[in-house]
Image (cartoon, rainbow, N blue to C red):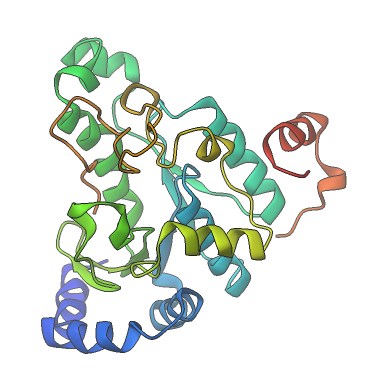
Amino acid sequence: MQQVEQSTLREIWSPEALEDKNQEFESYSPTEIVEWALNEFGPDITLACSFGGVSGMALLDMALNINPDVPVFYADTDFLFPETYAFKEVVALGYGFQPLAFKSALTPEEQAAKYGEALWATDPDLGCELRKVAPTAEALSGHKAWIARLRRDQGSSRRDIGIIEWDDKYGVANINPLANWDEEQVREYLAGNDVWYNPLNDQGYPSLGCTHCTRAVQPGEDMRAGRWSGFDKTECGLHLPLNLEDAKPSFLSVLKNLIPGS
């Protein structure tokens, strides 16, 4: 997107315009917000889905049911859980779309050579910058808006998020259709619409990131307590249908092992 287009878009979505739209959206359902966003920004919007949490899967289902061609991306840090990589393949096959992977400019080996073997343990902020923030910036380049999975109940750092915000980091509009939903409402949507989710979400991992920076959450802990445990850090810094009968045996095996009730 050219700079003049970004500037014009920012003028359209002034603080006053955002406030008015947010007040209006508080009474909308997430599906209605997703539909509005897809119509408002047309081909210049993209959806972020990490395949690691229930919110992302709810939004993916909403968006693809409205527009099967909406681009979907994820930041492939090279350190995601094996279950997440496997689940991503199953979801792509089931919905009949191809998620776009964006990676760091550094391979894990190059990163280790430059910053040490365990950057996630010595400087997790830099690690996230290299492996999540920079790839997300690349993914959003050329777009005017993105749909994200943030919710106000996910912790103090997200308590005041708007349903639509201006994202200064990336120069785009940020749409949070689930902002005023909680975990129970998201789970109800998944159950009511037969939406799959990462099996680790039911094994103590309500929020999944990289293997090195994510642990299981203990009873009574905040749902994001398992992320960057031991650090003063709570955020990473981001803010074609196919027939399963024609699938390769390996995919069907993954489906059977990962998807409840398959």
Residue 122 in the image: state x and y as whole percent: 15, 18
Nearest to the observer: residue 42 or residue 184: 184
The answer to which quarter of the image holds residue 133 is top left
For the point 46% across and 46% down, which residue is it? 53
Location of residue 172 with respect to 254 vertically, above or below: below
For the point 45% across and 74% down, which residue is it? 30
Residue 194 in the image: state x and y as whole percent: 69, 59
For the point 44% across and 57% down, which residue is it? 183
Nearest to the observer: residue 133 or residue 180: 180
Residue 246 shown left or right of residue 178 in the figure: right
Residue 216 shown left or right of residue 35 in the figure: left
Residue 66 shown left or right of residue 113 in the figure: right
Residue found farthest to the front: 220
Location of residue 141 with respect to 250 vertically, above or below: below
Quadrant location, the N terminus: bottom left
Residue 142 in the image: state x and y as whole percent: 32, 62
Residue 16 in the image: state x and y as whole percent: 13, 87
The answer to which quarter of the image holds residue 226 is top left
For the point 24% across and 54% down, which residue is it? 239
Residue 209 can be seen, yes or no = yes
Residue 69 can be seen, yes or no = no
Please state the total of marks drawn on the protein image.
Answer: 0
Quadrant location, the C terminus: top right
The answer to which quarter of the image holds residue 65 is bottom right
